[in-house]
Image (spheres, rainbow, N blue to C red):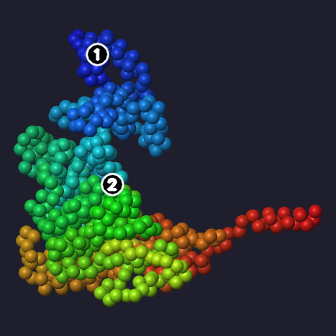
């Protein structure tokens, strides 16, 4: 490797630790210090590194105090830095147990950047939904990189894409904003697959992110609008002409949303999005869509109650339906932010999974719509003994005993306070069936097989039925348009009623748009019941429960609306009360017979014979 004359420096040591020397001394240094304590993994050897990649923070409080350099290893799978050799071996074993046995990162010579990467960082080329993006080695740790990327958010990106594709069928061209671009993967997918139907704007406040987004545009043959410096990205000198164009902006998210109107806005900051909701609803156009992704699982899932109160202004406790509680809490914050701008919301989709909470809402302009949305913010009465729950009735009448609104009788049989008030929460529906059906069509058209089962579950959950009112995957979009023809026609009437020039100004024909909104409300299906019960949470001791699908059938035969829910794989969404739920569960449960009573009886017989 070190053929030739002249002095060479060690690639794994800083200049002040090991000065440049001739090749024979450098080879001896590498063998005795770095090569001697390597860790081997999948025919690759990780030598110990003394570069300032990992530093211990000094105990001094001054900013001038530098941290002490620590020798470390770089993992070839995830590029994390680990100091001890035994810890690195244990770390690699965990990768093997998870099935991650391939080195993800190529050398820096394969990086298509013009400038050399400082520190010799390597890049990974990742492909998702036909879109290629470059990732930094530490892209999974947001504290150490500006271009954060998570593979676990693939479902989120596909759901957002399908919701945008549905809106793009009604408005063309559609101005959409990815307010937090990072690597730009989401905006690039929009531009690459929807082409001329959308005008994509990708924004990020960090200079490194903006540079990487532009390079990823070049990687996907997408033109960057307004770019005149550096490499030609407009395809003038390339054999392949650009397939689409995007606008890359370096600006604070609140600033760009205040400056310009958009039809579709997606907010996905790292953590909570409450700081950006006011700016999002400030300039979003009428009947546009705002999608919000929240990843602050600690405050959403009742682990940091003080942070929940600070960000969302809600009092919550840990419940069996904590995921739906999180979705309704985020929707309450969205509705309040929209109401401050004299706008209401119509919830199209609310999904809460392990890593994120996604809500998609349609914006309805006008103080009347804002008042209607504000009326759906209510307190929730939750029984801490049986976990029965009910939204408090609206009105200003003072009720002497709030426990009367609960279907359970826990307060009468137990002393003290048995229930708590949670919220305020969104008490309206969480899904729009017609919109979900059109999302399923978009998922089939763009070959998104990963989210098709989830969207089908959402459709059944929106109708609160175990029947599947949709064809199998592969059906034509024409059949779905026939099913959702009423929704499409009403949306077209709304677009005709919107006489504004899409500049975000208030319409003059408010009577016509109000009539169309009434038709949309009339065409929607019966509202699904709020919340769900877990079959395992309310199981009877000493009884074998029926299978979940069988139990759903029994509840349907008993005259209740019932469906499964994506919030909990063992959850049942139904309009039955908890007492009725347990009654049906007890009726069809079979007693469990153990061998312990038989053995004790046999022992007593033996004692009698003795």
Cα separation, mark 2 vs mark 1, equals 44 Å
Q: Quadrant of residue 487?
A: bottom left
Name which residue lies at 37% across and 30% down. Answer: 72
Q: Are marks 2 and 1 in contact (CB under 8 Å)?
A: no
Considering the image in quadrants, where does the N terminus appear?
top left
Disc ID at residue 426: none
Q: Residues within 10 Å of mark 1 (few under 14, many from 20)?
A: few
Quadrant in which the C terminus is drawn: bottom right
Label 2: few (<14), some or many (≥20) within 10 Å? few
The vertical placement of 268 against 330, above or below, is: above
Residue 282 placement (x, y as % from top left): 14, 67
How many marks can you see?
Answer: 2
In percent of width and height, residue 66 lies at 26, 32
Of residues 314 and 567, the one nearer the viewer is 314
Q: Position of residue 372 (x, y in %)?
A: 24, 81
Q: Which residue is mark 2?
A: 153
Residue at point 45%, 71% (across, down): 564
- Percent of width and height locating residue 165: 24, 64
Answer whether residue 169 is visible to the viewer in this image: no
Q: Which residue is mark 1?
A: 2
**147 lies left or right of 306:** left
């Amino acid at each position: 490797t070190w053929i030739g004359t002249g002095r060479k420096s060690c690639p794994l040591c800083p200049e002040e630790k090991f000065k440049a020397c001739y090749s024979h001394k450098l080879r001896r240094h590498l063998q005795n210090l770095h090569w001697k304590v390597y860790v081997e993994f999948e025919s690759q050897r990780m030598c110990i590194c003394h570069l300032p990649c990992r530093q211990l923070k000094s105990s001094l409080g001054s900013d001038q105090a530098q941290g002490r350099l620590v020798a470390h290893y770089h993992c070839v799978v995830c590029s994390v830095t680990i100091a001890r050799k035994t810890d690195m071996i244990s770390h690699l074993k965990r990768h093997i147990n998870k099935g991650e046995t391939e080195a993800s990162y190529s050398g820096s010579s394969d990086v298509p950047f013009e400038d050399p990467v400082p520190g010799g960082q390597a890049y990974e080329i990742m492909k998702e939904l036909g879109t290629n993006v470059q990732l930094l080695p530490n892209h999974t740790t947001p504290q150490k990189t500006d271009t954060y990327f998570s593979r676990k958010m693939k479902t989120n990106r596909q759901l957002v894409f399908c919701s945008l594709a549905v809106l793009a069928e009604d408005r063309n061209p559609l101005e959409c904003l990815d307010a937090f671009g990072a690597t730009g993967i989401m905006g690039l997918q929009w531009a690459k697959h929807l082409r001329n139907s959308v005008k994509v704007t990708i924004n990020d406040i960090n200079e490194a992110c903006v540079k990487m987004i532009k390079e990823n545009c070049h990687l996907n043959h997408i033109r960057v609008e307004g770019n005149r410096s550096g490499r030609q990205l407009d395809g003038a000198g390339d054999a392949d002409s650009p397939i689409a164009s995007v606008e890359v902006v370096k600006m604070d998210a609140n600033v760009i949303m205040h400056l310009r109107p958009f039809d579709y806005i997606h907010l996905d900051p790292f953590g909570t999005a409450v700081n950006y909701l006011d700016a999002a609803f400030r300039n979003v156009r009428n009947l546009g869509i705002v999608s919000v992704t929240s990843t602050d699982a600690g405050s959403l899932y009742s682990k940091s109650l003080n942070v929940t109160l600070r960000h969302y202004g809600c009092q919550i406790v840990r419940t069996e339906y904590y995921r739906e509680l999180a979705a309704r809490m985020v929707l309450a914050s969205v509705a309040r932010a929209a109401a401050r701008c004299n706008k209401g919301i119509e919830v199209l989709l609310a999904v809460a999974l392990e890593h994120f909470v996604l809500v998609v809402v349609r914006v309805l302009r006008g103080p009347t719509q804002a008042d209607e949305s504000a009326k759906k913010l209510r307190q929730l009465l939750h029984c801490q003994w049986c976990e029965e729950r009910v939204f408090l009735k609206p009105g200003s009448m003072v009720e002497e005993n709030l426990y009367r609104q609960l279907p359970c009788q826990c307060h009468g049989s137990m002393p003290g306070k048995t229930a708590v008030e949670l919220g305020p929460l969104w008490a309206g529906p969480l899904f729009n069936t017609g919109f979900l059906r059109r999302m399923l069509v978009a998922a089939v058209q763009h070959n998104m097989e990963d989210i098709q089962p989830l969207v089908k579950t959402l459709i059944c959950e929106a109708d609160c039925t175990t029947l599947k009112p949709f064809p199998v995957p592969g059906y034509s979009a024409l059949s779905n348009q026939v099913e959702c023809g009423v929704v499409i026609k009403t949306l077209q009437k709304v677009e005709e009623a919107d006489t504004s020039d899409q500049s975000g100004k208030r319409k003059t024909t408010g009577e016509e748009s109000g009539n169309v909104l009434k038709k949309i409300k009339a065409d929607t299906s019966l509202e699904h019941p709020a919340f769900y019960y877990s079959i395992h949470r309310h199981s009877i001791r000493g009884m074998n429960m029926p299978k979940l699908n069988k139990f759903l059938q029994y509840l349907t035969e008993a005259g209740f609306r019932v469906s499964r829910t994506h919030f909990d794989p063992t959850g049942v969404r139904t309009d039955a009360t908890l007492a009725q739920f347990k009654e049906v569960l007890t009726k069809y449960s079979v007693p469990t017979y153990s061998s312990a009573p038989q053995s004790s009886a046999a022992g007593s017989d033996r004692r009698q014979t003795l």
